[in-house]
Amino acid sequence: MKDFISAEVLSKLDSRLTDFFAEGRSPGLVYGLAVRGELIHWKAVGQATIGKQECTRTTAFRVASLTKSFTAMAVLKLRDLGLINLDAPFVTYTPDLNPQQIEFFEVTVRHLLTMSAGFPTDNEWADRVESISDVQFLELMNAGFRFDSHPGTRFEYSNLGYALLARIISNVSKMSYVQYVTQEIFFALGLRNTTFDFTDSHELAMGYAKLDQWVEEPHQGPGAFSSIGGVITTLDDLVAWSHYLSSAFNPSTPEQGPLKNSSRREMQSISQSGPEARGGKKPSEYQGPQGYGFGLRVEENIEFGKIAGHTGGYPGFGTHMAWHCESGLSIFALANGRYADPVDATLPALREVLTVLPKKALVLTLELEFARSKVLEIITAWDESTTNTFFAVNMDLDYPREFRKDQISQALIKTGTLTAQYELLESYNRSHLKWLQHGEKKSMQIEIWLAPLAPLQLQVLKVSAVDFFHAGLNKG
């Protein structure tokens, strides 16, 4: 796949990231493009510590909310071990909390994971309390919560929810959150340059805020809110992390590491719609549904397929990671400026690179191949016994059979005799297919949907004559 990513494509990526850096959102920036765990292009620009240290490939950054994917994996690991029920009220696993509001008992673990607990958005507040102790955390929690919406009814980005998940992880595992994630995820995946403790990182960039000039943001140590944004890591470790997640969509990937493949795919599936659109596109310009999975934002892009990742903003840092789940193409940016938002450059850049990749050839199931040949038989030599068997009950109710026969005849007049040559256009799932069947004068565009019951039957058949064109996919 990397052979399709030319020097020209990489030059455009560099221009986009260079322009972003020139805006002065951070003193330093490290970014990279990877394919299935291999870093194929990277650059480091600017200063990790002003006047002392330049950015390099191995510079470590606090990655802020990218941490939430690690937190979500820890919860799912405990779920897979049978120790957590995602649909149980979260207070089931926090006996040390003393909730005063009835809404508390409606909030499930799943609501916390999917940003749908009903808590208010709390970025600025939460980013400043990472290092508080467990005792201070319990005091805050037992003082009471505010709710902006009923639990489970809408998306509302909540760091507090992920801090509560850390409490659950600790109570269930009998380890601190930091110990559990470090041992069960970082060490298990060989992420040796990933930590929660800034004193462990020897090449850590200093975080900055832009006031009249760049001002250092003091590092925060691990605490009760580390689960929202406390991870410190490097570009190469993020490449390995994203590859572990995206490889779950590759059928040949063996079961390995801390979480089974199906659970990793579950993390990267939309569970709650509604996150704010980012990356230079307005919500109306998105080509498909977008939402939140478990610790990850997910876009179901109609043109490219599933894209997963997360943004990160923190006092002193701004980060982004995103990947195309099918191909494993991934992009990363780590900046040491407060809420620098490199996603404004990286997500459009990822989409641009995806446009140069070859479209995947469609592979038909045996059912769809049988249905395609049967439909072609009906179109070229209409037979009542065949249609009686193959048409679902709705077909003649939707369009009288004579009307449908006439529609096919009119299309055949325009196309001429159909040949054996065809090109597949798209297949949304195992019950849908659209293709071009080439004729002597024109092509016939044919679209079918299979009915949900056995035996195999058609519930939709659409035909139209179209001018010749090549779909760029597989041919027959």
Image: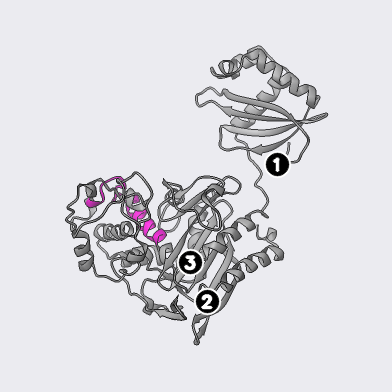
Number of the front mark, 1 or 3: 3
Between the C-alphas of marks 1 and 2, the distance is 45 Å
In this orientation, which residue lies closer to the viewer: 177 or 113?
113
Amino acid tagged 1:
Asn
Numbered tag placed on residue 156 in the rendering: none
Residue that label 3 marks:
319
Please identify the quadrant where the N terminus is shown. bottom right
Residue that label 2 marks:
28
Residue drawn at (34%, 55%) of the image: 75
Which quarter of the picture shows residue 180?
bottom left
C-beta proximity under 8 Å, tags 2 and 3: no
In this orientation, which residue lies closer to the viewer: 280 or 62?
280
Q: How crowded is mark 1: few (under 14 residues within 10 Å), some or many (20 or more)?
A: some
Q: Can residue 394 be seen in this view?
A: yes
Q: In the image, 263: left or right of 249?
A: left
In this orientation, which residue lies closer to the viewer: 465 or 168?
465
Residue drawn at (48%, 51%) of the image: 298
Task: Give above or below for 119 relative to 460.
Answer: below
Magenta extent: 68-91
In this orientation, which residue lies closer to the viewer: 316 or 137?
316
Task: Return the x and y of residue 422 as percentages of the image width and height.
Answer: 73, 34
Between the C-alphas of marks 2 and 3, the distance is 12 Å
Q: How crowded is mark 3: few (under 14 residues within 10 Å), some or many (20 or more)?
A: many
Closer to the chain start, of discs 1 and 3, is 3
Q: Is mark 3 on a helix, strand or loop?
A: strand
Q: Is mark 1 on a helix, strand or loop?
A: loop
Task: Return the x and y of residue 244 as percentages of the image width and height.
Answer: 49, 58
Task: Return the x and y of residue 199 as percentages of the image width and height.
Answer: 37, 79
Residue that label 1 marks:
474
Task: Give above or below for 52 relative to 145.
Answer: below
Number of the front mark, 1 or 2: 2
